[in-house]
Amino acid sequence: MSLTSIASHVFKPRQKALEKYVSEGENMQRGVLRRLIDNGRRTEYGVQHLLKQTEGYEDFTRNIPVNTYEELKGYIDRMRHGEADVLWPGTVKWYAKSSGTTNDKSKFIPVSMDGLHNIHYKGPFDTVALYLMNNPKSRIFDGKALILGGSHSPNYNLPGSLVGDLSAILIENINPMANLFRVPSKKTALLSDFEVKREKIAHECLNKNVTNLSGVPSWMLSVLVKVMEVSGKKHLEEVWPNIEVFFHGGIAFTPYRKQYEQLITSPNMHYMETYNASEGFFGNQSRLDDKSMLLMLDYDVFYEFIPMDEFDKQNPNIVPLWGVETNRNYAMVITTSCGLWRYMIGDTVMFTSKNPYKFVITGRTKYFINAFGEELIMDNAEKGLEYACEKTGAQVSEYTAAPVYMDSHAKCRHQWLIEFSKEPESLDEFADLLDKRLQQLNSDYEAKRSHDITLQHLEIVKARKNLFNDWLKDKGKLGGQHKIPRLSNSRKNIDELLEMNSSAEE
């Protein structure tokens, strides 16, 4: 009997419980809210916001304001200095470093012990439970998991509190038994220099029986390319014959899928998306043939949603899970056992189903272009690029886009900086296909493009190889959980990249 067939029995009770998601979503969420309120009553924040008098959802929305990081930052700073019972009962030792805000280089997201065990560790357990339901012939536990994580950030530590990428925090606190099933070594996994880490991972894991991968698609691809270089093989299954699944998250998989399919040609290979962030673990792909994800309803996370068409209004109509509509774009608001109260995470989602609640990530509240009323979101961009790649045989490695507000000829357009892993024969054809597909996907974009009056044809600038990696490295953000900002109304990022791109050509 294989180790996987033995281990699979551990997941059966949870698989049974997940079946209740179809009919008990609202009850689960109301129960989560009660639990969070009960715990919050014992905190300074709870006293300030009348949680002792808060009984249900209506009281909750009346007493607790919607918060950004800036609103909670003062509380979090005090928690990092060792104060107890501020946003969550007790002291919080660990803080996940996330990308910065307008005023700060980094955000420090509290990771309480309750949140660690009732959110962050529950998510991966359910990922495996759902995968085994989809693939009962799996032999995943008969080999090792290659888990690609970030690092600690000792320069941000304070007495009594530690900072790191969330993945590093998870590795640091993981049950020692789990280390029997994972590679690389803990020492290598927590290295901060990504280039050194990548080299060490390739050599450490080369002769291991790796059956599954977990990580961010862009950084994992970089590691796998190094494995191929070291091994001298053409396909990954020649190195790891039993490789069967990649659990991916953090960024959209679409731009990388073709490269993975060329690297791993085994018909037994599967891809499963997860929605895990520094703030919590929120979603799991529940079926391998369905790209939408199951919203995880019985963790220590209470969800609310702001319709994006009301996002900039003074009093938007914020709804709980049971108030959402399918095919409508929402900004997500969370309350968690890490002390995040009605916190705007910055991600946008769209529900594809309500029984059970399933969704797709559509982008970020800040990652969109709306310079001329076109409201182009990341989901449009990903689908447009997928279409253009499919038609031309091109492959996109990285990209970012921003508006050109008005050039010397009074022309306005979107400018795309794209690093291709496989270039199209004609950049003009690729641009045409992308532009037309965006018009099909987004009626506002189509209206602004009409007759080239408001918005002219998009422009594509070809990025040199490794431009985006060099840009991240220059900012000290190579590896870990760092992501390329895909869409922006600001030209700050794209202008920095364009300058690096042109200086290399001189």
Image (spheres, rainbow, N blue to C red):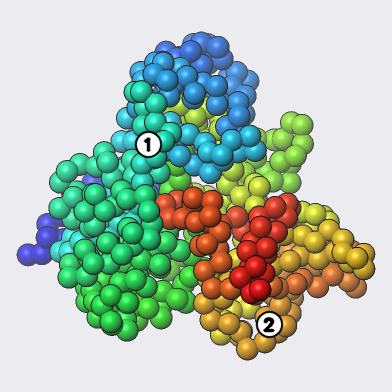
Give the amino acid type for the residue marked by disc 2 in the picture.
Leu
Give the residue furthest to the left.
1
Find residue 352 and name its label: none
Per the image, the residue denoted by label 2 is 427
Quarter of the image with the C terminus in it = bottom right
Per the image, the residue denoted by label 1 is 154
Q: Position of residue 366 (x, y in %)?
A: 66, 47
User: Dot 1: within a 10 Å radius of its alpha carbon, few (fewer than 14), some, or many (20 or more) residues?
Assistant: few
Left or right, 7 with respect to 276, comes to left
Dividing the picture into quarters, in which one does residue 171 lie?
top left
Residue 205 visible in the displayed image = yes
Relative to the observer, which residue lies in front, 383 or 500? Answer: 500
Residue 385 visible in the displayed image = no
Relative to the observer, which residue lies in front, 90 or 492? Answer: 492
Kindly state the secondary structure of the residue where label 1 is placed: helix
Dividing the picture into quarters, in which one does residue 31 lie?
top left
Give the amino acid type for the residue marked by disc 1 in the picture.
Pro
Q: Dots 2 and 1: beta carbons under 8 Å?
A: no
User: Dot 2: within a 10 Å radius of its alpha carbon, few (fewer than 14), some, or many (20 or more) residues?
Assistant: some
Relative to the observer, which residue lies in front, 142 or 19? Answer: 142
Q: Position of residue 303 (x, y in %)?
A: 52, 37
Q: Position of residue 215 (x, y in %)?
A: 38, 57
**Going from the N terminus, do you reach mark 2 or mark 1 first?**
1
Q: Position of residue 325 (x, y in %)?
A: 62, 48
- Mark 2 or mark 1: which is in front? 1
Quarter of the image with the N terminus in it = bottom left
Give the CA separation, mark 2 to mark 1.
45 Å
Kindly state the secondary structure of the residue where label 2 is placed: helix
Left or right, 318 with respect to 110, comes to right
